Amino acid sequence: MGYTNEMKFIQLVFTSIFVMAILCVFPKEAYAQSQPQGDAVSFYLGPVLPKNISATDEILNAWGFRYAYERSAGKYFELGFTMSNSENSEFRNLDLSVRADIPVQDLTAFFLAGPDMVVYQGTYYLGVHIGGGLLTHLSESVFFRTEMRFNFHPGTALLFFFGFDFHF
């Protein structure tokens, strides 16, 4: 018996709460003044929640990677690739983002936006996305990244990503 969409959403909520609880364990004073600097490579995974897309309305498990080029302090250009082959649906997303970092106490919040090229079931679409998230400092050059992104066209899709940024 497969998961229903409601069960998958409940699983996502509990996973998010668990990840946030783990992040609260790290000492706040240790990296309070550290902010991401330099170019970065990221690896991430998480669910994609498509809506009003003829190819699928199932929650998809996705993974991907991105490269962030630091334009100036706290300003980045990001190139990312996300893919999924779950629920008998082929999903690919190539995106270009402009990201702005904002220090918030011990974390770094960020906002991003940009264009997308999306492939659903072999059909190509052009779209845009907006999103935001948090970076939590784990070591000198490693950050834990949580991100929520909203894609427009085809239909709409909400993407939740969890992963690691490696700055160099």
Image: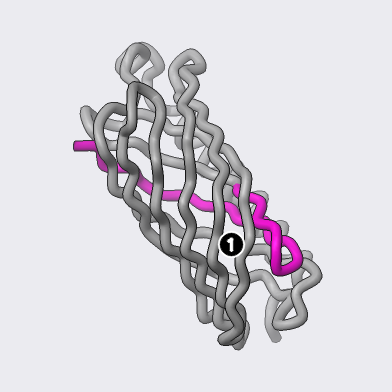
Image spot of residue 54 (x, y percent)? 77, 81
Left or right of 24, for residue 165: left
Image spot of residue 85 (x, y percent)? 51, 80
Q: Which residues are magenta?
A: 149-168
Looking at the rendered image, the quarter that the C terminus falls into is top left
Residue displayed at 48% across by 40% down: 98
Image spot of residue 142 (x, y percent)? 27, 37
How many numbered discs?
A: 1
Q: Which residue is mark 1?
A: 47
Colour convention: one colour
Q: Nearer the viewer, residue 141 or 53?
A: 53
Residue 154 in the magenta stretch? The answer is yes
The answer to whether residue 89 is above or below residue 113 is below
The answer to whether residue 57 is above or below residue 105 is below
Residue displayed at 50% across by 42% down: 146
Q: Secondary structure at mark 1?
A: strand
